[in-house]
Image: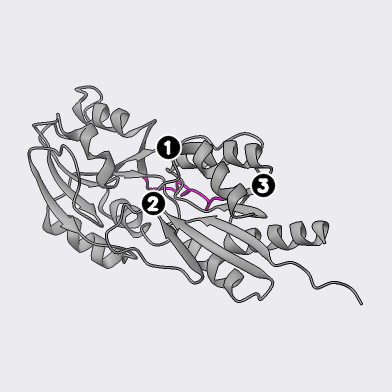
Amino acid sequence: MSAPRRVCRVLVLGGTAEARRVAGELAADPGVEVTTSLAGRVARPRLPEGAVRIGGFGGAAGLARWLREHRVDALIDATHPFAGTMSFNAARASAAAGVPLVALRRPGWTRVPGDRWIPAESTADAAALLAASEPRTIPADGRVFLTTGRTGLAAFAGLTAPWFLVRCVDPPPGPCPPRMRLLLDRGPFTVDGESELMRRHRIDAVVTKDSGGAATSAKLVAARDLGLPVIVVRRPPAPEGVPVVADPAGAVSWLATLRGQSG
């Protein structure tokens, strides 16, 4: 009689809806023991199924040590597309600990006819575009809907002319623009709701990150319908050599293939 198959231990680097879906599917599998790691930056995070740990690891070396100590068999990086530091730490830790890694990255948004997108390489670049005198597609003292997240507001703190409507889940921790209104809210959002919000606050332009996904894409449709320019911050590059899947099903399939190869 063959020996019982050892449980597969999986660490999911989470904080996204996709991570919660992956954890939910894996938690339902009796052959998998899943733990989701959350950075702890959100006061009331939506918790996934399975075990949860909150807080950092102490860089790539700390994560590698955690993987070894907990005998992790597979690592799934399902963090936000802009969590670049965590993704590179995951790649380094994976290599150091010898633990297979896959990155789950939802596709970015696609520009369609009618969009007035202005690309930016970073939040600092987006702030420079707002401050630039040429080309003046956005009024110098315009009203800007800023949805780049609470940790990126420092890049706009030096802009004194524009007025900002800042939306984020939790209050921002650091420097903020001097002329702003803070709106604490969490998606998903609707096109009608975003259109009404932009009209009510007489928004002239939108600044956002290319997060992808449907939960916050309604603002892009609303901006298109209203003819507003949108500064879109590009994603940071993904670590080289790490396989990438586009959805939770791809991550679950990757793990199934890995388990089949090791079994």
Q: Is residue 41 magenta?
A: no
Where residue 234 is drawn, which disc sits there? 1
The residue at 29%/64% (across/down) is 44
Residue type at tag 2: Gly
In the displayed structure image, the side of residue 76 where residue 112 appears, left or right: left
The residue at 31%/28% (across/down) is 125
The picture places residue 76, in percent across and down from the top left corner, at: 58, 53
- Closer-to-camera residue (1/232): 1
- Measured in 3D between alpha carbons, the distance from the residue under mark 2 to the one under mark 3, in whole angstroms, is 21 Å
The crowding category of the residue bearing disc 3, from other C-alpha atoms within 10 Å (few below 14, some 14 to 19, many at least 20), is: some
Q: Which residue is mark 3?
A: 99
- Measured in 3D between alpha carbons, the distance from the residue under mark 2 to the one under mark 1, in whole angstroms, is 27 Å
Q: Which residue is mark 2?
A: 55
Residue type at tag 1: Arg
> Can you name the residue that lies furthest to the right here?
1
The picture places residue 68, in percent across and down from the top left corner, at: 62, 48
